[in-house]
Image (tube, helix red, strand yellow):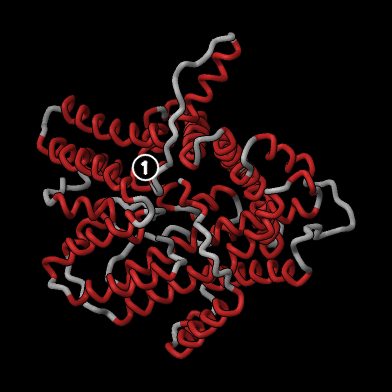
Amino acid sequence: MLFNSFEFVVFFIVVTLLYFNLPYKVRWAFLLAASCFFYMFFKPIYIFILFFTIFIDYFAGIWIEGQHDPKKRKLYLGLSIAANIGVLAIFKYYNFLNGNISGLLELFGVHNPIPYLNILLPIGLSFHTFQAMSYTLEVYRGNQKAERNFGIYALYVMFYPQLVAGPIERPQNIIYQFYEKHDFDYEMVSSGLRLMLWGLIKKIVIADRLAIYVNAVYSNLHAYHGFPILWAVLFFAVQVYCDFSGYSDIAIGAARVMGFRLMINFTYPLLSRNLTELWRTWHISLTSWFADYLYKPFVTEHRDWGKTAVVAGIMMTFLLSGLWHGASWTFVIFGAVNGIGLVYDVLTQKQRKKVSRKIPSYIYNPVSIVLTIFYFSFCTIFFRSKDFHDAWYVISHIFLFDRNIIGVPVFTQVSFLLCFAVIAFSFIADYILKEGLFAEQLGKRSVKYALNFMGLVLLLMFAIFEQQSFVYFQF
């Protein structure tokens, strides 16, 4: 079920009330059952896919921990990773790979006999697959004891707040919390509800409103050029940020209400002064996953290459990150252009520091933020376009300006200005929180109540109540 649905409101209230009123010893079992129900609300049969990998990884962890032979430990780890990647490959990448094989064979006049599969991608598959793999990897590294309680391990993979779109948690950060007794804590509950409220505002006030403009342009690209395309590109960068960080806020907030502490997934990335800083603060649970399990081991293994290892590690990591986002060459290109931006940051770090010393910070920092947003927005063209032809049309027509600065018939002047208003609200709110402005005032209970009331007013006046799915659900 969607976080922005009436069904979830009922589900959340019922689950939370029952959780605090049930005996401590059965709470984990109740949460597991509730999480199963939550996931089955989308498509019931796909829960068997989750339990297939849960079953394999549970025993793999025990076998890895109990084995002293390095070769057998690697074998068990390999079996676990192969099972997880195999499921991901079949449901997410099979048709993509098969299509590329068909294209290559057709160059030689050969027909590909391998059939395509008419299957739907299980929702959130990439997220819980990576979370499951982090468990066996951490057990293998000795950072996590193998979990003997099958139900607790299953709950680690299926915990409903972050099951569908993260954050992608590490086992040492969350499994022990399922053994703790969480009593009702007013501060935890109030801060969790507040985070859920503002996450919902990000989603249905900002992201879904911007989506109206973005969808209108991208669904009929060849009717537009210049400003309408430029606004759509810039709006989408903000849309996808508010959509995904909004989901993360709701997930973290829902868990916090019950006493659980999930990792922060976003820390104001659109206020970053370079692309490296942006990716350190955007989808932190995924970028840190790639950094810990792919980038750092690669650079360490090839440290004798010097800076070449860093460049190669960045490009490899971001190409795979792009492919993680979707089974399409546009997503691979999305990863590649982001990787190129980070390589530029690495290779020009000293020069940029020299320039920053010569320019006042009140000029250098805002200009750096704007340039970073523009480059990231350019990258998202490949994220949003359905194929390379659409992406190229956007790139080749984005600067063909005329006097019509709006240009989308379905949008009124008021609606267009409202888009700018919600974007300004988002940036101002993020800036205040990032810089710690008015911290003393914001910490007062009366101010918190006033902000909560303002948030509810924003929801009632400007929200889009159409239960639009979250962008990252497709991954």
29 left or right of 473?
left
Q: Nearer the viewer, residue 371 or 448?
A: 448
Residue 179, located in which quarter of the rendered image? Answer: bottom left
Q: Nearer the viewer, residue 265 or 439?
A: 265
Which image quarter is the N terminus in? bottom left
Q: Nearer the viewer, residue 140 or 406?
A: 406
Q: Where does the image place residue 53, in percent across and percent down from the top left? A: 26, 40
Q: Where does the image place residue 366, in percent across and percent down from the top left? A: 68, 61
Position of residue 253 relative to residue 266, above or below, is below
**Residue visible at 36% across and 50% down?**
43
**Residue visible at 68% across and 65% down?**
362
Q: Nearer the viewer, residue 451 or 290?
A: 451
Label 1 element class: helix
**Residue visible at 58% across and 62% down?**
207
- What is the residue that sits farthest to the bottom in this orientation? 446
Q: Where does the image place residue 414, in percent across and percent down from the top left? A: 75, 72
Residue 194, located in which quarter of the rendered image? Answer: bottom left
Q: What kind of residue is marked 1? A: Asp
Query: Is residue 356 among the parts visible in the rendering?
Result: no
462 left or right of 300?
right
Position of residue 444 relative to residue 399, above or below, is below
265 left or right of 346?
left
Q: Where does the image place residue 444, in percent across and percent down from the top left? A: 44, 87
Query: Is residue 374 among the parts visible in the rendering?
Result: yes
Could you tell me how many numbered marks the image carries? Answer: 1
Crowding near the residue tagged with mark 1, few <14, some 14–19, many ≥20 C-alpha atoms within 10 Å: few
**Residue visible at 39% across and 38% down?**
296
- The residue identified by callout 1 is 292
Residue 117, located in which quarter of the rendered image? Answer: top left
